[in-house]
Amino acid sequence: MDARFDGRTVLVTGLGVSGRAAAQVLRDRGAHVVTFDERSAEADVADAAVLVADGLAGADLVVTSPGLAPSHPVLAAARERDVPVWSEVELAWQVRVPRDGGDGEAAPWLAVTGTNGKTTTVGMLESILRTAGRRTLAVGNVGTPVVLAAVDPALEVLAVELSSFQLHHTHSMAAQAAAVLNVAPDHLDWHGSLEAYAADKGRIFERAQVACVYDATDPLTEHLVREADVQDGCVAVGFTLGSPSVGQVGLVEDVLVDRGFARLRHTHAAELGTLADLAQLAGPSGAVPPHVVRNALAAAALALAHGVDAVHVRDGLRAFAPGAHRIVTVGHVDGVAYVDDSKATNAHAASASLAAFEPDSVVWIAGGLAKGAEFDDLVRAREDRLRGVVLIGLDRAPLREALARHAPHVPVIEVDAGETEPVMTRAVTSARRLAAGAPAGVPTTVLLAPACASMDQFASYAARGDAFAAAVRALGGADDAGRERPQDGRP
């Protein structure tokens, strides 16, 4: 039992993976748990109005799902009643247990956030830590819920991916080291403004113990570091694709180097690895894309802050394998490559995806839930890559209008919902027609990089990517090995 929770009533909102984990951990500590989920028949309460009228079931604490925006009536009622609201991440921090080994300390957290790149960076970090012999796990917004990892004494260190939603209601976490990879407009419907979104990202730096890692070329991420209230001795470490200054990690020709933690950093850069160690993440051109190198440098900095040796950074990056739905070639039809980057769920990610291809070579499948985003900057920057566009999803208008303004020469086909044939089948068929107009000998790619969330028509970005791959297979386009072939680790 835990005296802080024993006999207390805790309202858990949302019965997804993290909500279920939170409820179990709370019950194990003697709490009386009441669950709320408007879409689950297993929840104790499914009607928000009833829950609010009932005084939040007498809750002493609310542990909320990332799916509920701060404006949700249940969370608004909690604030009005001065009932504390925690994220699952905050609960995890509060219930940490000492790690095995007898030092009495809980496993430190190495935490990562950013609009894009979180999953890849955390995966790289996990690979580096494992190579160094640490008992670790990638947790949080990916994989195992962080609340379950926090109560596992066998883990020595956690690689924690955190979304802005999770950080919003996190109040006391003190990561050993934390990174903000980038901040671009996303989830503005949830946060209300870019400023509020960035501020929630910046919460990851609060109370950091050893290092705050940021993009040295991005004034916004640097500003978040400067504004953070960190522990004495915590340092700021920037990552850059150029030659690093003291206090940075960076790139010298094709060598990843450290001048942030190395003993002789004031006069020398310590080698961490080379671009060849990231060869498994090369893009369609055969080069490692810049955003992948940035992810690797951020992961390296976090590992170094934990005390990992440079040789383990190199070996961990070599061992890392990219995840699914991140620029994966799923087939070829009539000489056209079909590439799944369904994980590109916002404009920033889609721009990075399109940048990996040659000019005038891409038939782009895009659209879904825009989440309040605009696409003018994306289309303006990448219109030279576009041979044609197929629009799907609920929020086609913002993309259609951006294309009309900045790429009026590019043919656009819109695929409406509600017809008998699955939407992705029709999208792939339409893309095939646009690709067929390419001059002989010109390499062409049909790229699914939607720049939008998937939940309007698919259960997840993974389901959307799977539907794309299935539609390509139906054209007779299974790749040479009959399976997906990863080409790039961009998240």
Image (tube, rainbow, N blue to C red):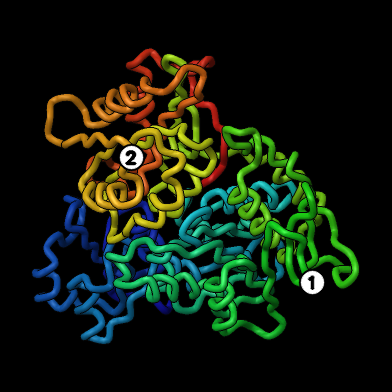
Residue with the mark numbered 1: 246
Instruction: Look at label 2 and name its amino acid.
Output: His
Look at the picture and state if 402 lies above or below 388: below
How many residues crowd mark 1 within 10 Å: few (<14), some (14–19), many (20+)? Answer: some
Q: Position of residue 140 (x, y in %)?
A: 48, 57
Q: Residue at horizontal 49%, vertical 39%?
A: 326
Look at the picture and state if 455 lies above or below 37: above
Q: Going by the image, does 104 lie left or right of 117?
A: right
Q: Residue at horizontal 63%, vertical 37%?
A: 282
Q: Are marks 2 and 1 in contact (CB under 8 Å)?
A: no
Whole-Å distance between the Cαs marked 2 and 1? Answer: 47 Å
Q: Residue at horizontal 79%, vertical 57%?
A: 257
Look at the picture and state if 82 lies above or below 319: below
Rendering quarter of residue 287: top right
Please identify, in this view, whether the residue under mark 2 or under mark 1 is nearer the observer: 2
Instruction: Look at label 1 and name its amino acid.
Output: Val
Q: Nearer the viewer, residue 93 or 127?
A: 127
Q: Position of residue 49 (x, y in %)?
A: 9, 70
Residue with the mark numbered 2: 409
Look at the picture and state if 202 lies above or below 367: below
Q: Going by the image, does 284 lie left or right of 347?
A: right
Quadrant containing the N terminus is bottom left
Rendering quarter of residue 71: bottom left
Q: Nearer the viewer, residue 233 or 214?
A: 214
Q: Going by the image, does 159 lie left or right of 201?
A: right
- The kind of secondary structure element at disc 1 is loop
